[in-house]
């Protein structure tokens, strides 16, 4: 039995694409992938869901402002400004802002190009 609550749908989230780099010409074997940097803003009470994984999409997150709660494996961990976390092939999670101010993160990941 998990202590994890039911995950609400995504709400109160704004994602801004900041930059991309086509990795094919940069690194052998990386054709069809890009390095992507985004700014993600989660309003108070906002949720970045549903539960998702990072298989084939590794990345890192850095918190600029506010507090983001990361839900993984039935554990909720709060991260505030100046810290972050890795998102590797073992990461399955969802995020929320339980605070009273907006939370802003910078997310950098490797994704398949559309």
Image: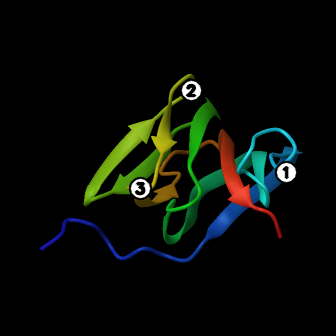
Q: Residue at x 57, y 39 (%)?
A: 60
Crowd class of label 1 (few under 14; some 14 to 19; many from 20; radius 10 Å): few
Quadrant of residue 47 within the rendered picture: bottom right
Q: Residue at x 48, y 75 (%)?
A: 8
Q: How many marks?
A: 3
Crowd class of label 2 (few under 14; some 14 to 19; many from 20; radius 10 Å): some
Farthest left residue in view: 1
Q: Residue at x 68, y 42 (%)?
A: 108
Q: What percent of the width, then of the height, locates residue 14?
A: 76, 58
Single out the mark in the foreground, 3 or 2: 3
Single out the mark in the foreground, 3 or 1: 3
Q: CA distance from mark 3 to mark 2?
A: 21 Å
Image: 83 above or below 36: above
Labels 3 and 1 touching (C-beta < 8 A) = no
Q: CA distance from mark 2 to mark 1?
A: 20 Å
Q: What percent of the width, then of the height, locates residue 53?
A: 48, 64
- Which of disc 2 and disc 3 is earlier in sequence? 2
Q: What percent of the width, then of the height, locates residue 77?
A: 35, 43
Image: 71 above or below 102: below
Which residue position holds label 1? 17
Which residue position holds label 3? 91
52 and 24: which one is in front?
Answer: 24
Which residue position holds label 2? 81
Horizontal arrangement in the rendering, residue 21 relative to residue 76 (left or right): right
Q: In terms of secondary structure, where does tag 2 sit?
A: loop
Q: In terms of secondary structure, where does tag 1 sit?
A: strand
> Is the C terminus in the top left, top right, bottom left or bottom right quadrant?
bottom right
For residue 49, which numbered disc appears in the image?
Answer: none
Q: CA distance from mark 3 to mark 1?
A: 22 Å
């Amino acid at each position: 039995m998990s202590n994890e609550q039911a995950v609400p749908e995504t709400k109160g989230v704004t994602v801004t694409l900041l930059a991309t780099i086509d990795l094919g010409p940069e690194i052998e074997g990386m054709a069809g992938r890009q390095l992507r940097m985004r700014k993600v803003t989660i309003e108070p009470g906002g949720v970045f869901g549903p539960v998702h994984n990072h298989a084939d999409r590794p990345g890192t997150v850095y918190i600029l402002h506010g507090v983001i709660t990361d839900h993984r494996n039935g554990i909720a961990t709060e991260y505030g400004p100046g810290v972050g976390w890795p998102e590797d092939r073992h990461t399955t999670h969802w995020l929320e802002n339980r605070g009273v101010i907006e939370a802003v993160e910078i997310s950098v990941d490797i994704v398949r190009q559309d």
